[in-house]
Image (cartoon, rainbow, N blue to C red):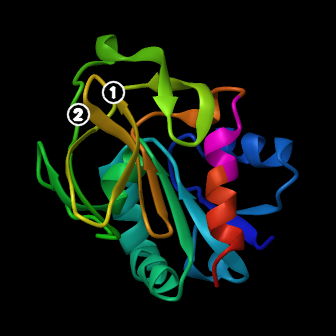
Amino acid sequence: MKKVGILAVQGDYEAHGRMLERLGVEYSLIRKPEDLAGVGGVILPGGESTTQLKVMKEEGLAEALRKLAADGGAFFGTCAGVILLAREVSNPEQESLDLADLKVVRNGYGRQLDSHVTPGACKLSPAPVEMVFIRAPVIAAVGPGVEVLAEVAGRPVLVQQGRVLAATFHPELTSDTTIHEHFLSLVSNGR
């Protein structure tokens, strides 16, 4: 298993680290392009996407991450990470890494009061998966190469395009390792 990187410029990256520790996976915190050495996949955590993008651009990480994707690296975005992965972002418009054919609406659920936890069906598990939504973005449309792995209320909440996995919820805040294990399979089958 190649090492996994976790973008650690802002957001809930520590929770992803704890999940990877539970799974016995080596990881490193990514703050600068040189931190990507030896990494086979990167987790883009929840948080505030405009802040994350600003720091990524200032540090040269945005281009380094795009290069890692072009070289076959796997990516897993949760919540704000989905915004960073999307091809098109609205409400308001925002630049992104453009690594997945997704149209995403920022603040799709709006206020903190709209946050919730729900079990949901998922193609990765025979049992329902616990989904923690915290001011989640909405995946408004997916391109033809995107597979929808889970939906809630008719909306995609977990999708995959090649070696890119995106969840509008926070699987790292649950005890269920299903989604992280799937991401790790993408890492181990790559570069």
Q: Which residue is mark 2?
A: 107
Q: Percent from the top left, x then y, of residue 84?
A: 35, 58
Residue at disc 2, secondary structure: loop
Kind of residue indicated by mark 1 = Arg
Q: Is the residue marked by circle 2 packed among few (<14), some (14-19), or many (20+) residues within 10 Å?
A: some
Q: Is residue 117 left or right of residue 112?
A: right
* Mark earlier in primary sequence (1, 2): 2
Let me know if residue 30 appears in the view. Answer: no
- What residue is disc 1 on? 135
Residue visible at 52% across and 34% down in the picture? 170
Position of 12 relative to 87 (above/below): above
Q: Which disc number belongs to residue 122? A: none
Q: How many tags in the picture?
A: 2
Which residues make up the magenta segment? 176-181
Quarter location, residue 19: top right
Question: Disc 1 to disc 2, how far (Cα)?
Answer: 6 Å
Residue 159, percent from left and from top: 40, 50
Q: Are marks 1 and 2 in contact (CB under 8 Å)?
A: yes
Q: Residue at x 37, y 17 (%)?
A: 115
Magenta stretch mostly in which secondary structure?
helix
The relative height of residue 25 versus residue 158 in the rendered view (above or below) is below
Q: Does 55 sit left or right of 172 as displayed?
A: left
Residue 78 visible to an observer of this rendering: yes
Under mark 2, the amino acid is: Asn
Q: Nearer the viewer, residue 33 or 171?
A: 171
